[in-house]
């Protein structure tokens, strides 16, 4: 009998650094140990550091291997109500069949861009009730099958649309109870939400926190007219630096060009005058006192 779900809640798990490993035990019973080290079978020695007390979870081994091989890949992993603050790189590399990963009610404030590598089959991710302030698209790129994402009750003031674009199979999104900053920076997110209203859950709880005059104003109630003053064509800092470099150079080049062309024109006119002077006919006088051409 395979173990379909593992509950690791309320175990004082603190920080995940490196990888989750599997380790087989003798007989048909296999163990997950949570003391100072979380270890699952066949790993490379990376660790998820935890705080005591130790917790053992038992599951039946895979009969096809006589109970001695790696524990059957779980479909569900609950890590809620712990003290996890960081998910380091490659936290779950040996759980390719995981369908649900639940991390609510922790102290999670940082997720490494490679933390979720290897979870391509994951369908549901619960990161609610944590301390998340920033999320990057790279973190979610491995989750090509993710259908449900819960980011409710965090500390998100903004969310890059790239995070949502990295999830092609997303069907349900929870963003409620975050301190959203309703300025021009939220325009890209508002557009995504407007085009994907059917995916946004609990829309009524998606409220502005800042600025004060918009506090508790529903984000979904905004319209295009609300963002008419936003500068959508603003350039990145790099472009302004380029303009600052090109501007003085262009100015000096134009002065040089104008000076050069002016000199050419002056020389040309002087040459024309001299040529006209040498071509003028000389005048002489005849015997009878009349001027004649020589």
Image (cartoon, helix red, strand yellow):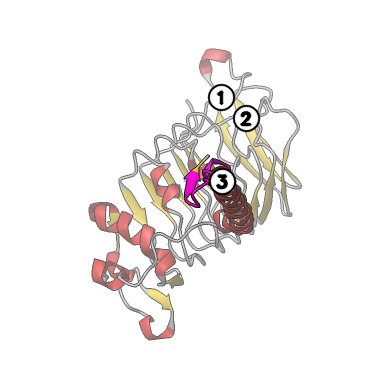
At label 2, counting other C-alpha atoms closer than 10 Å, the crowd grade (few under 14, some 14-19, many 20 or more) is: many
Residue 217 point in image, percent of width and height? 32, 78
Q: Decide: marks 3, 1 in contact (CB < 8 A)?
A: no
Q: Which mark is residue 155?
A: none
Q: Residue at x 65, y 36 (%)?
A: 20
Is residue 122 found left or right of 245 in the rendered image? Answer: left
**Residue in the foreground of this view, choosing between 187 and 93:** 187
- Location of residue 113 with respect to 13 vertically, above or below: above
Q: What number is the disc on residue 268?
A: 3
Magenta span contains residue 285: yes
Task: Determine whether the residue tagged by mark 1 lies in a helix, strand or loop.
Answer: loop
| Magenta-highlighted residues | 277-292
Rendered image quadrant of residue 272:
top right
Viewer-nearest residue: 44 or 56? 44
Question: x, y (%) of residue 31?
Answer: 64, 34
Question: First in sequence: mark 2 or mark 1?
Answer: 2
Query: For numbered disc 3, what is the local secondary structure?
Result: helix
The span from disc 3 to disc 1 (Cα, nearest Å) is: 98 Å
**Image position of 65 with respect to 130: above or below:** above
**What separation in Å lies between label 2 and label 1 (alpha carbons)?**
6 Å
Q: Which mark is residue 61?
A: 1
Q: Earlier in the sequence, mark 3 or mark 1?
A: 1
**Image x and y of residue 284, in percent:** 55, 46
Circles 2 and 1: CB atoms closer than 8 Å: yes
Return the residue found at the far bottom: 213
Indicate the quadrant where residue 133 lies.
bottom right
What mark, if any, has residue 30 been given in the picture?
2
Q: What percent of the width, then of the height, locates residue 220?
A: 27, 67
The residue sitting at 48% across, 45% down in the picture is 292
> Quick one: label 3, few (<14), some, or many (20+) residues within 10 Å?
few
What residue is shown at x 53% (from left), y 26% (from top)? 72
């Amino acid at each position: 009998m395979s173990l379909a779900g593992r509950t690791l809640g309320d175990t004082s798990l603190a920080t995940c650094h490196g990888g989750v490993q599997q380790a087989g035990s003798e007989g048909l019973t296999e163990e997950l140990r949570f003391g100072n080290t979380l270890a699952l079978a066949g790993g490379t020695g990376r660790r998820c550091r935890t705080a005591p007390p130790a917790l053992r979870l038992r599951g039946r081994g895979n009969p096809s291997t006589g109970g001695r091989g790696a524990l059957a890949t779980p479909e569900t992993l609950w890590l809620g109500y712990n003290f996890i603050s960081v998910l380091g790189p490659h936290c779950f590399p040996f759980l390719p069949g995981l369908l649900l990963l639940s991390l609510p009610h922790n102290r999670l404030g940082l997720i490494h861009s490679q933390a979720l590598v290897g979870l391509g089959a994951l369908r549901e991710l619960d990161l609610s009730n944590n301390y998340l302030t920033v999320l990057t698209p790279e973190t979610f790129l491995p989750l090509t099958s993710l259908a449900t994402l819960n980011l409710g009750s965090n500390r998100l003031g903004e969310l890059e649309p790239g995070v949502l674009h990295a999830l092609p199979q997303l069907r349900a999104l929870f963003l409620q109870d975050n301190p959203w900053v309703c300025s021009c920076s939220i325009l890209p997110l508002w557009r995504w939400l407007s085009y994907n209203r059917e995916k946004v859950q609990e829309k009524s709880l998606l409220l502005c926190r800042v600025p004060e005059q918009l506090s508790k104003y529903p984000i979904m109630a905004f319209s295009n007219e609300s963002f008419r003053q936003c500068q959508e064509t603003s350039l990145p800092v790099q472009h302004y630096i380029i303009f600052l470099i090109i501007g003085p150079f262009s100015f000096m080049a134009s002065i040089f060009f104008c000076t050069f062309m002016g000199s050419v024109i002056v020389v040309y006119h002087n040459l024309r005058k001299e040529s006209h002077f040498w071509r003028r006919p000389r005048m002489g006088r005849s015997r009878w006192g009349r001027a004649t051409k020589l």
